[in-house]
Image (cartoon, grey):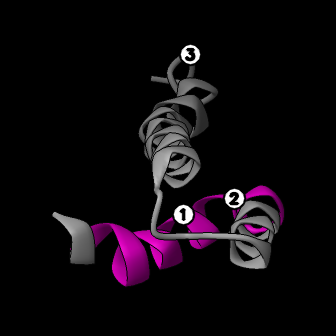
């Protein structure tokens, strides 16, 4: 059990990283976000990582699909 403890953060981070990458790639392909708004979303996703991706998911991604 002691050998598995270092793996727990990695196991938690992998789905979060995949979610972030999916939202970032969707933001790059989103044609409804134009001009300065795209830069704002890019900065938000870059600096706030998963929390920014969750915000993008709730405000942009769910509206399109």
- Measured Cα–Cα span from mark 2 to mark 3: 29 Å
Where is residue 28 shown, x and y percent of the image?
A: 58, 46
**Mark sitting on residue 49:** 2
**Distance in Å between CA atoms under marks 3 and 1:** 32 Å
Where residue 34 appears, x then y in whole percent? 63, 70
In this picture, which residue range is highlighted in magenta?
45-62
Question: What quarter of the picture does the N terminus occupy?
Answer: top left
Which residue is found at the position 59% from the left and 39% from the top? Answer: 9
Callout 1 secondary element: helix
Tell me which label, 3 or 1, sits earlier in the chain. Answer: 3
The Cα atoms of the two marked residues, 1 and 2, are separated by: 6 Å
Residue beneath disc 3: 3
Q: Residue at x 69, y 59 (%)?
A: 49
- Which numbered disc flags the more N-terminal residue, 2 or 3? 3
Q: In this view of the protein, which residue sits in the foreground, 15 or 56?
A: 56
Contact between marks 3 and 1 (CB within 8 A): the answer is no
Most common secondary structure along the magenta stretch: helix
SS class, disc 3: loop
Q: Is residue 51 magenta?
A: yes
Q: Looking at the picture, does residue 30 appear above or below residue 38?
A: above
Left or right for 34, reference 46? left
User: Which of the 4 quarters of the picture holds residue 33?
Assistant: bottom right
Residue beneath label 1, please?
53
Between 46 and 50, the one lying in front of the other is 46
Q: Position of residue 31 (x, y in %)?
A: 47, 58
Q: Which class describes the residues within 10 Å of circle 1: few (<14), some (14-19), or many (20+)? A: many
Residue depicted at 46% across the width and 55% down the height: 30
């Amino acid at each position: 059990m002691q050998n598995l403890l270092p793996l727990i953060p990695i196991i938690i981070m992998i789905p979060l990283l995949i979610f972030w990458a999916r939202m970032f790639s969707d933001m790059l392909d989103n044609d409804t976000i134009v001009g300065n708004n795209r830069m704002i979303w890019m900065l938000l996703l870059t600096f706030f990582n998963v929390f920014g991706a969750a915000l993008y998911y709730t405000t942009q991604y769910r509206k399109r699909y």
